[in-house]
Image: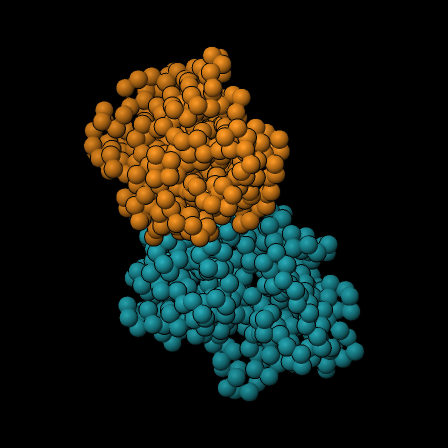
Chain colours: A orange, B cyan
Amino acid sequence: MRLLKERNIEDIALGAAVLGTGGGGDPYIGMLMAKQAIRDYGPVELYTLDELNDDDLIVPTAMMGAPTVMVEKMPNGDDIVNAFKSIGKYLGKPIRATMSIEAGGLNSVVPIYTAARLRLPLVDCDGMGRAFPEIQMVTHTIAGIAATPMAMSDERGNTVLMETINNRWTERFARSITVEMGAMAMIALYAATVGQLKTASVPGTISQAERIGVTIRSARQTEEDPVNTVREAVGGYLVFKGKIADVQRRTEAGFAKGDAFVDGIDEFAGKRLQMSFQNENLVALIDGVPVVTVPDLIATLDIDTGEPITTEGLRYGFRVAIIAMPCAPQWRTPAGLELVGPKYFGYDIPYVPVEERYG
Amino acid sequence: MRLLKERNIEDIALGAAVLGTGGGGDPYIGMLMAKQAIRDYGPVELYTLDELNDDDLIVPTAMMGAPTVMVEKMPNGDDIVNAFKSIGKYLGKPIRATMSIEAGGLNSVVPIYTAARLRLPLVDCDGMGRAFPEIQMVTHTIAGIAATPMAMSDERGNTVLMETINNRWTERFARSITVEMGAMAMIALYAATVGQLKTASVPGTISQAERIGVTIRSARQTEEDPVNTVREAVGGYLVFKGKIADVQRRTEAGFAKGDAFVDGIDEFAGKRLQMSFQNENLVALIDGVPVVTVPDLIATLDIDTGEPITTEGLRYGFRVAIIAMPCAPQWRTPAGLELVGPKYFGYDIPYVPVEERYG
């Protein structure tokens, strides 16, 4: 166990934005809330799975919906507490700790807020090892753990609880309630024991996000090649370097879809990269040939600072480096690829692990 | 207490269609289900409120959504049982009986099915004394009783429970989940004690529906003036007799809105009635002058048989009588008129009780 203090939160948020692979939501408001909660309630205990008992019950907490809404309609914090307590009451069992369901951006810091407010521990793991857009896209689903009972709460005091026959129905009902709640809801779901989570989660991702954040911050100060430093810290591969020549965006079925086109520089001069995204970066092609696909991670970094750029932040003229990282091993199983492989997102491209191309 | 047997169900359904004032849904499938359940599980005990203890807990059950969907996607019956049991589990208290939330059409027979299946009594009352389209439009709301906890279940096995800050939020979330469940959901809500229901419900409406049904059936056989017989049985007033000259329909915000135009015959010859509906008949005007408005009941009867015609059933050339009946007294309070008065439905017409015009 170690303590997460106020100064750790910015590093976690910064590093989580790399794992967010262009999505995962801007963690700014969530970060402010988590820092304030730590000031008010004290530091948060961060446990590894091995430090807890196998039958301890863990319930993740998260924000669902459009993170951009948070800027205008700030959660009051009671909403996430309500969602968490509703699940506890419904299960009729004590909950030992909370965890992150998504290791990207906003949802890396939301459970830190929950943990601080309720003086509960946080577990150092998550259900994706990156960001994904839908509720069923978690390693819990592969392990056969139900998303429900799930609780959703809004800042007015409304709470919705559901029990569904599978995790896709959870996504369907929850998406619709999120819209009614004003495009944003606080959720608690995927109750599981520590024993289950030892195979059903991606371990160590809060610490990993923090390490990445520390690396980016140091790289900025020491004026090394920041992209290379970050790439080494994440155990990733350099896919491309170039200047953004065009960004095409469209909204389809609630997704922010689009493509960014990058003209190569340095060793990539004369080549063109196309990166397709749906909230997150999903597929990268160089001169029409696929080089990295989901579920492996594709991050866009600012060449000068090594800082991650979200898909919404992509702009003409930016000088960027594209790096790729291996996804959690669960995603490479047939069940994992069925949930989040290129086909699910509508790309008729076979999945080839990033190490096979770049390792 | 008396027993409802298979042969009582058709009379209740027929009479409830008059109280449904053109809406309330076709009770056909619900009636078949209720009759089958009585065959399988035995007759249903019907209690008046006075025959129960004041602290007995009553939970209404109903169908929400588009009754037309039932014809294609028949409820399996377990859905309504699931909704009812979820509320019981959530409340953690024994439920003494179920009741009808709406005294019109389908939702007069759905709770009979619930009662038979679960071998629970049915209470002889409802929350409207007629049909209305939205969840908050019940006498419970006027009495300050919360719609939630509310449970919704579908035929697949999904269940959604909610706790909302007021009954309009219940309507909002429930409407959206109903759409996701396939335009039809089985619901249990508005838990209340018998003591509360003595002022918060409309008493005797199951028996009233049955009496009306018996009257229509006898009138058919004895070849009296059936419309007049039915009018007397409901304690209503004859507003108009004529031939339907035109029916205009449009769908707005999920409502089946429209207007029927009727050219007078007999003592109404030379006059024209316009009847505006939104699922239910809401306003009747003769030569442009409002004569009856919601919340008073407006029913369209076939002149030759005295049988009620729903708004969907209105067709050019039908010879119809329009009768009006006083609504339950709760609807005539300021709180009642705010919930279901002409203004709520978008008509800028003051409410004048039907007895003041016709009494």
Q: Is residue A149 shown above or below B303?
A: above
Q: Is residue A104 above or below residue A257?
A: above
Residue nearest the viewer, comparing B239 with B48 = B239
Image x and y of residue A168, in percent: 39, 50
- Looking at the image, residue A51 lies above or below residue B118: above
Q: Position of residue B234 (x, y in %)?
A: 56, 70
Image-quadrant location for residue B241: bottom right
- Front position in the image: B269 or B150: B150
Q: In the image, is residue A1 above or below residue B358?
A: above
Q: Is residue B204 left or right of residue B257?
A: left
Q: Residue furthest left?
A: A54
**Residue farthest top in this picture:** A222
Identified at 31% across, 48% down, the residue is A335
Q: Is the N terminus of chain B in the top left, top right, bottom left or bottom right quadrant?
A: bottom left
Residue A209 in view: no
Whether residue A246 is visible to the viewer of this picture, yes or no, is yes
Number of labels in the image equals 0
* Residue shown at 70% from the left, 56% from the top: B347
The residue shown at (35%, 47%) is A337
The spot of residue B55 in percent (x, y) is 36, 47
| Residue in front for this viewpoint, B320 or A340 | A340
Quadrant for residue B125, please give it. bottom left
Residue drawn at 55 percent across, 49 percent down: A252
Q: Position of residue B26 (x, y in %)?
A: 50, 70
- Asked if residue B297 lies left or right of residue B348, the reply is left
Instruction: Give the position of the C terminus of chain B as an image quadrant.
Output: bottom right
Relative depth, front residue between A340 and A247:
A247
